[in-house]
Structures are given as structure tokens and as C-alpha cells.
Image (cartoon, rainbow, N blue to C red):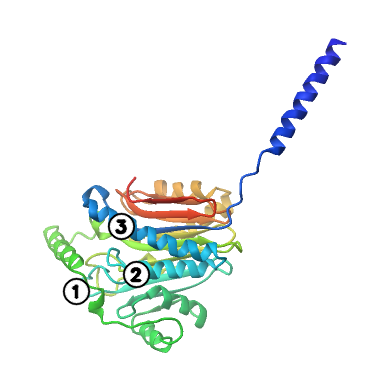
Amino acid sequence: MIARFFCGVFLVALALVSCARAAEPAAKKIEFAIAVHGGAGIEPDALSPDGRRARTRALGQALDVGRKILADGGAALDAVEQTIRLLEDDPLFNAGRGAVFNAAGGHELDATIMDGRTREGGGVAAVTTVKNPISLARLVMTETKHVLLIGHGAEQFADEMRDKRQIERVPNSYFSTDVRREQWRRKVEEEKAARGNKRASGAATMGTVGCVALDKQGNLAAGTSTGGLVNKRWGRVGDSAILGAGTYADNHSCAVSCTGTGELFIRNAVGFHIGALMAFKGMSLDEAVRQVIDEVLPDDSGGLIAVDAQGNISMRFNTEGMARAAADSRGRVEIMLGK
């Protein structure tokens, strides 16, 4: 009798707990998500307070552009392109206006964009007069049967596309800033003193912009744009122009945009590597990102931002800092420069 009583009490209590859990609101689905970076290698403590505020403000403005497109039901590809265009126009970053100088004293720009729905993508490399390389990269994807156009061929294509999608041409000097010129001068002296050391030294050689996004339709996209490494050889192309290395997007796994010493990201196919760890080993986004950044890439080589099909965001680096920002439909908003 007593046993039946306690059994009845237990069942009632269990039912009450089950009802209470059922009444708890389920976690709200992430409808859209976006992350932006302004380059790894930055040392926040080396920046002036004004410099930190300027970069934080610029990242916030770029984040707002992409977030509004996504919140209004726009496509991830549009959010990525428009966000990167804004960063390309900002001389604080090493992409577009404010790109670093190469060894010839000029600027050569690389960019890629990738559509997670189809895994189609487009890239341009070593362009010298295209104001917004990310938009030209998108046209390579949508208007040609190719994936990558370089140098004069890419610029001829820009002429053909000038009226189609805001493809503006500018003189190469447009990309120059006094800050970048001084950075180049110091780099030349440093490399002379090092007697031609092959390894690009110091975090100051890094800096790239990128964006990854998930839209309300469940589609992923990624894009990256850069001026490359300070004092790079004329004709050098880094990972930002290479699908699967500096940029990757697949609706079945994730979207990735990288920043750092491009040769290392190319050799390790970093973007695809992360997607493969998720697809073939069942890793979560953050687990895959941690493994690649912490175990595959050497220290002080760079970082990346990534988002998966559920709207989870991962931003990780092995340098002193990485300018980055993230937002989603749940109200998450964060902007950071350091660790």
C-alpha cells in the first residue's frame, strides 16, 4: 500500500516536471547570422585609443550593412558583397583603398566570393585598377564559365562589365595611403637587414577583410578581399583569391573567410579543410576551426571567421589579435580586436 502511494507520488511529480519542461520556451532558431573580419595580426595594444575606436566603428558599420540585408530577407551573397565593398573603401584595412604596397611600389589586389548553395565561386587576382575587386569576383562567378581571372585579363573583363555591376576603375595611386607607404618603407629596411629571409616576419605583414553569412533561406556565402603582404613580389597571389583556401562556402557544412600568411592557408586548403572535418568527421564548427587553427597552422600565421548552416559562428586566430565582429537574428552583436 505504502509502495503504491510513493509510486503514485513519484509519477505525479514526474508528470509535473515533464509539463514544466514542455512549457519552457524552446530556444529561438537563428534565422540569419553574419561575421566580418578586418585582418589578423593586429596588435590592439600597439594602437592608439583613436585607432582602436576607428577600427571598432568601421567594423560596426560594415556589420550593420550586412545585418540589415539579412534581416530584410536578402541573400547571403548580397550581404557578403556589400559588406566587403564598404571595407574595401575604408583606408584602415588592407583591401581596396589602403592596400599595402608590393615590392614594385604598387598595389595588386585579390578577392573571391563563393555561393554555398551551388559551391560556385569567382575570384580575381593581381588587379591594379578595380576599385572594388569583390564585385568583379562575383561577376566572374555569374557571367563567365571560369573561377579565377588574373592581371590584365581580369581588368579587360572589368571593362566589359563596367556598366553591369558598379565596376569602377581607378588609377593605382587611388589605393595608396601615407600610412601604407611608411609601412612599406620600414618593411624594405627590415628585409634588407634580415638579408632576404624568405619568411614574412611580423604581424604587420597581415591584413585582409572578409565576411561570412547565413540568410533566412538557409543559404551560406563567403567572401574575402586583400592587398596581400607588405613588399610581396610582383605577381604574388595569396589565399584570398583561392576557393577552398581563403574562402569557402557549402550549405551542407559552413562558410569560411581567412586572413593571414596566405601561403600557409593555400598549402593547408584551410577553408575546405574545415568543411571536410565537419562533413566527414562529424565535428562541430567550433571543433573544426579549433583543430585547424591550433593544430594544423603554425603559430602567428593568421585566423578566420566561419558560420555554419545553423547560424553558429566561430572566430579564431593564433596571432596577437584579429579585428572581427559578429551578429545574428537573436540579437547577438559583438566587435573585438584582441584576444
Residue at disc 3, secondary structure: helix
Tell me how far mark 3 sits from mark 1, CA to CA: 26 Å
State which quadrant residue 14 falls in: top right
Callout 1 crowding tier (Cα within 10 Å): few <14, some 14–19, many ≥20: some
Reading the image, the residue beneath label 1 is 105
Type of residue at label 2? Glu
User: Residue beneath label 2, please?
Assistant: 88
> Which amino acid does the dot numbered 1 rest on?
Gly
Relative placement, left or right, of 328 versus 9 is left
Check contact, mark 3 vs mark 1: CB within 8 A: no
Element class at badge 2:
helix
Depicted 169 relative to depicted 216: above or below: below
> In this figure, what is the number of numbered marks?
3
Seen at 21% across and 70% down, the residue is 177
Front of the two marks 3 and 1: 3
Q: Are marks 2 and 1 in contact (CB under 8 Å)?
A: no
The three-letter amino acid code for the residue at tag 3 is Arg
Q: Earlier in the sequence, mark 2 or mark 3?
A: 3
Tag in front: 2 or 1:
2
What distance separates the C-alpha of mark 2 from that of mark 3? 13 Å
User: Looking at the picture, how far across and down is residue 169, in whole percent?
Assistant: 33, 83
Q: Is residue 28 above or below residue 164?
A: above
The dot on residue 55 is 3
